[in-house]
Image (cartoon, rainbow, N blue to C red):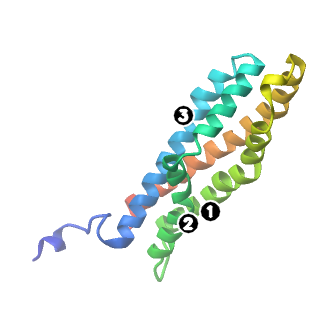
Amino acid sequence: MHISDKHPASLTEGFPGMVLLAATITTCLSAGVFYAYAVSVVPGIGRIRDGAYLSAIQSINRAILNPWFMIVFMAPVFLLPFGSWQQFSKAPDAAWWALAAAAAIYIVGVFGVTVVCNVPLNEWLDKQDLASAGEGVLKEWRLRFEGPWNRWNLVRTVASAVSAILSVWAALRLK
């Protein structure tokens, strides 16, 4: 009897396992970014005056567009469906369906919401000249931005968390 007969293959054995591992890790990291943002950044900056709030958001939105964030944010868009496709067998089981669901939820609820909802708000705010705006205009801009952005960010946070949970569960169950 070989050792491999006694012990199942490691999750990371071979290319499909590495893809699944990378998909799961990047999905979890992305969920962590959205969660941290939702529970710390949003409430923290929500307490400051309009001009400072808008300026802080502009700065954060510019800073987050970096290679490290983009890798973590974009990788699940490609790795979750690819990993799901690699795991597809003659009879897909619950773990495969969970991984496929994680991919769909991430693509629609995280990537899609970001591109369709949050990015246009970020781009609009980035074009505003905060230094020359009066207090009334700053208040108006904040009202236009803050509520919608926070609602869509909550959608991304929940979707990324659900995708992470499903991908971890699937990774632990797939053979």
Which quadrant of the rendered structure holds the C terminus?
Answer: bottom left
Instruction: Tell me where residue 12 sits by quadrant.
Output: bottom left
Earlier in the chain: of badge 3 and badge 2, it is 3
Separation of disc 3 and disc 2 at Cα? 25 Å
Residue 101 position by quadrant: bottom right
Residue depicted at x 17% and y 74%: 5
Q: Residue furthest left?
A: 1
Q: Is residue 137 above or below residue 160?
A: above
**Residue 10 image-quadrant placement:** bottom left
Viewer-side residue, 59 vs 132: 132
Q: Nearer the viewer, residue 60 or 47?
A: 60
Residue 165 can be seen, yes or no: no
User: What's the residue type where badge 1 is placed?
Assistant: Ala
Spatial distance from mark 1 to mark 2, Cα to Cα?
6 Å
Q: Residue at x 58, y 48 (%)?
A: 160
Residue 95 position, x and y percent, is 47, 65
Residues at discs 1 and 2 in contact (Cβ within 8 Å): yes
Q: Which mark is residue 83?
A: none
Circle 3 residues within 10 Å: few <14, some 14–19, many ≥20: few
Residue tagged by mark 2? 100
Q: In the figure, is residue 30 to the left or right of 116? A: left
Q: Earlier in the sequence, mark 1 or mark 3?
A: 3
| Amino acid type of the residue tagged 2 in the rendering | Ala
Taking the image as drawn, is residue 106 in sight? Answer: yes
- Which residue in the structure is indicated by mark 3? 36
